[in-house]
Image (cartoon, grey):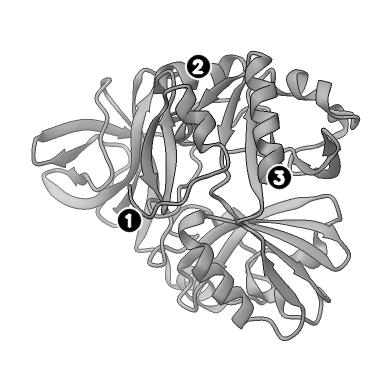
Amino acid sequence: MENLLRTPLYEKQLEIKCKMVPFAGWEMPIQFDGILAEHGYCRNDVALFDTSHMGEFFFKGDIKTSGINEATSINIEALNIGKCKYGFLLNEDGGVIDDLIIYRLSSDELMIVVNASRAALDFKTITSRLKTGILDDRSKETAKLDVQGPNSKQILQKYFDTNLDDLGFFSFVQTTIFGKNCLLSRTGYTGELGFELYIDGETSVQIWDTLINDGVKPAGLGARDALRLEMGYSLYGNDLTEEITPLEANLGMFVNLKRDYAGKAALEKQKEEGLKRLLIPFKTTSRRSARKDFEVYQDDKKIGFVTSAAFSPTLNVGIGLAMIDVKSFDGEKSFELRDARGAIEANKASLPFIKK
């Protein structure tokens, strides 16, 4: 694991004997007590995730004239201060360079949260689309903790003066914790009630220790993947790539074709011509789970490939997403997910896989 980046919590995580893996150029915890146990902590109580590997850019300038409003699919002008929104940084072919969330800090200030594996390209791309304004990469000095689960609000309320009941979904507040600045966001990647805390590295260690001592259980990337997939949330590099458009990824509800932004013309053309392929959810007929890049066969004909898959602890079956050829696929019939070791029977499902 040479040359991998480490979050400020690396040493703390090693102390409790977590399993580390390389992820997007970082050495990250994949599990602590085990994926199934950590999935349960989040679904039934509260879990603590270290997501300090994510990238954070800060923009300052005129939203209307700087070019930032056309840089991504998100209409920042329509975004109220204290609100954030999910969307895409697209290439000219409509493919997804990255999916991201933009936070409206003030009339002329934004925070843009991006995936770690795409941060350098994202920064270069967004900067190239600006006419004026300043984009500042503060990823290295910004740590991030996710507190997720039905009891997350009850746990966190003790440490904030802000009434967390007043914080709506995809809303945030700039506040303090332990006397240090904190952007507290009512967002998450699990489908549960949850919050994301953006703080400095030193404060992240203090928060980690405090919450662990308060009985909150840590969770790693393994549980996070199963949790997000049960909700049908996309993972960049799997379900979204520069070759996959939001329309093909079944995320058309997050793109507005009535306004101009980079990549919009390509999406408009794709919609007019009709989709040739589409990302669909599936459930296996057993506890067996496929993996990324399994091939999809129906009537013994290859019609697609799996982009994401995992065992669902909630449903007790395998679940996943697959990119299929629209003309060749019959959603009323079962199909097979194949690799060199054999085949797994599956059926088309609907999202989310579980209702929250």
Identify the mark nearer the N-term, 1 or 3: 3
Residue on which the image places disc 3: 198
Circle 3 packing at 10 Å, graded few (<14), some (14-19), many (20+), is many
Which residue type carries mark 1? Val
Can you tell which mark lies on residue 40?
Answer: 2
Q: Residue at x 70, y 30 (%)?
A: 207
| 215 lies above or below 25 | above
Residue 309: image quadrant is top left
Identify the mark nearer the N-term, 2 or 3: 2
Secondary structure category for the residue under label 3: strand
**Residue 151 at x, y percent in the picture:** 69, 17
Which residue type carries mark 2? Gly
Q: Nearer the viewer, mark 1 or mark 3?
A: 3
Residue 347: image quadrant is top left
Distance from label 1 to label 2 (Cα)? 36 Å
| 104 lies above or below 132 | above
| 125 lies above or below 313 | below
Distance from label 1 to label 3 (Cα)? 41 Å
Can you tell which mark lies on residue 217?
Answer: none
Total label count?
3
Q: Nearer the viewer, mark 2 or mark 3?
A: 3
Residue on which the image places disc 1: 326
Circle 2/circle 3 CB separation < 8 Å:
no
Secondary structure category for the residue under label 1: loop
Identify the mark nearer the N-term, 1 or 2: 2
